[in-house]
Amino acid sequence: MRRMRRAGAEENASEIDLTPMLDVVFIMLIFFIVTASFIKEAGIEVNRPEASTATKKENVNILVAVNATNEIWIDKRRVDKRSVRSVIERMHAENPKGAVVVQADKASNTETVTAVIDAARAAGVYDVSLATEDD
C-alpha cells in the first residue's frame, strides 16, 4: 500500500501548473493591442511631387489620396468630395492624436487638394500635411 501512495504523491508533484504563464501571455497580448497604432491606408498609389525640404511625419493615422483624375480615396474606398469631412471626423474620433496626410498626385487639381485640406480642418484636424517624394 505504501508503494501506491508514494507513486501517487510523486505523480502529483511532477504536474506543472500553466495558469500563471497563460495569464502573462494574455496580459502581454492586451498590452500590445492597446498600444499598437493602426494606420489607415489610402488605397491607391499616386505619383507625389518631389520636395527637397521633406520631413518624416509621426502619428499619422489618416491617409487621403488624390489621384491624377481627382478621385479621393480614404481607407481603400473612393470617397465623394462632399463626404470627405464626415469620413475624416469619424476616423479622427477613433484616434484623436492622429494627423492627416494628403497624398496628391502630380497631375491632380489644386482645387481638389485644397478641398480635402479644408475638409480635414473643418473636421477638427489641424495637423494636415502634404506628402512628397524625397529628391
Image: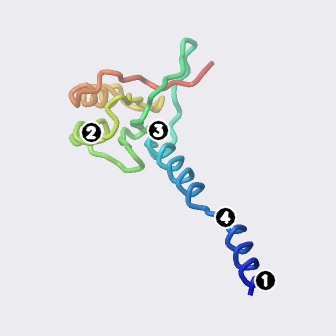
Single out the mark in the foreground, 2 or 3: 3
Query: Decide: marks 3, 1 in contact (CB < 8 A)?
Result: no
Residue 31 image position (x, y, % from top left):
49, 43
In this figure, which residue is indicated by the disc labeled 3? Answer: 35
Q: Residue furthest front?
A: 2
Single out the mark in the foreground, 4 or 3: 4
Residue 93, by quadrant, is top left
Q: Nearer the viewer, residue 11 or 41?
A: 11
Q: Earlier in the sequence, mark 2 or mark 4?
A: 4
Query: Decide: marks 2, 3 in contact (CB < 8 A)?
Result: no
Tell me the SS state at disc 1.
Answer: helix
Tell me the SS state at disc 2.
Answer: helix
Residue at 49 percent across and 23 percent down: it is 57
Q: Amino acid at mark 3?
A: Thr
> Relative to residue 89, is residue 15 depicted above or below?
below
- Report the Cα–Cα distance between label 1 and label 2: 78 Å
Q: Amino acid at mark 1?
A: Arg
The numbered dot on residue 84 is 2
Q: Earlier in the sequence, mark 2 or mark 3?
A: 3
In this figure, which residue is indicated by the disc labeled 1? Answer: 3
Single out the mark in the foreground, 1 or 4: 1
65 with respect to 114 (left or right): right
